[in-house]
Amino acid sequence: MISLKIREANKEDIKDIASVYVDGWKTTYQGLVPDDYLEKLSYEEAEQKWIHFLHNENEAFIYIAINDAEKVIGFAAGKNNDDENFAGELYSLYLLKESRGLGAGRQLVSAITKQFKEKGIESMMVWVMEQNKSGLGFYERMGGKEYLRRKSEFGGMLVDDVAYGWANISVLINEDE
């Protein structure tokens, strides 16, 4: 694992979050959604998306990962969930391409999980595009169990999504942090 600082995000972090989000989409979903959809992603719209998320979703929060150079290299977002089986949702997890596979994702998931536990939430789910094989593998390695499926639309293209769930999120907490 790399040495990172993980902390809850604030409004000053929105530009960095938007940057990781857009760059993450462009590297993760290239070839999985239409190119013109990815080309139209903008940092300004992403900033608005994440401001809206923090102010309008059900008890939403975001954690960021900062490297030794003080650069935000990833983030994870969580919110309360209305699902009957999973009270929390890992709404998103994005890392810059060069930061993947180094433990940042696990550390961010652990931070989200700790926040849920502090709020009395014991279970969590996450949606993943089925074609995102690295994402599927990540959540399977973390013990997620397939729960639901749905269709989503990006740039006029329908994709399959898979939900993974954890009935007991305690297994996701890294006590070394």
Image: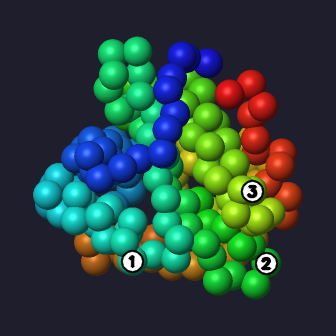
Q: Position of residue 42 (x, y in %)?
A: 15, 56
Q: The residue under label 2 is which amino acid type?
A: Asn
Q: Which residue is mark 2?
A: 85
Q: Residues within 10 Å of mark 3 (few under 14, many from 20)?
A: some
Q: Position of residue 1 (x, y in %)?
A: 61, 18
Element at badge 3?
Answer: helix
Q: CA distance from mark 1 to mark 3?
A: 21 Å
Residues at discs 1 and 2 in contact (Cβ within 8 Å): no
- Image quadrant where one finds the C terminus: top right
- Lateral position of residue 110 relative to residue 66, left or right: right
Residues at discs 3 and 2 in contact (Cβ within 8 Å): no
- Is tag 1's residue or tag 3's residue first in the polypeptide sequence? 1
Q: The residue under label 1 is which amino acid type?
A: Asn
Judge by depth and name the residue closer to the eye, 173 or 33. Answer: 173
Q: Residues within 10 Å of mark 1 (few under 14, many from 20)?
A: few
Image quarter of residue 64: top left
Element at badge 2?
Answer: loop
Q: Please name which of the two marks, 1 or 2, marks the residue nearer to the observer.
A: 1
166 w.r.t. 58: above or below: above
Q: The residue under label 3 is which amino acid type?
A: Lys
Q: CA distance from mark 1 to mark 2?
A: 22 Å
Element at badge 1?
Answer: helix
Residue 137 appears in the rendering: no
- Lateral position of residue 22 relative to residue 77, left or right: left
Q: CA distance from mark 3 to mark 2?
A: 16 Å
Judge by depth and name the residue closer to the eye, 86 or 24. Answer: 86
- Lateral position of residue 43 relative to residue 131, left or right: left
Residue 154 appears in the rendering: yes
Image quarter of residue 45: bottom left
Q: Which residue is mark 3?
A: 117
Q: Which residue is mark 1?
A: 56
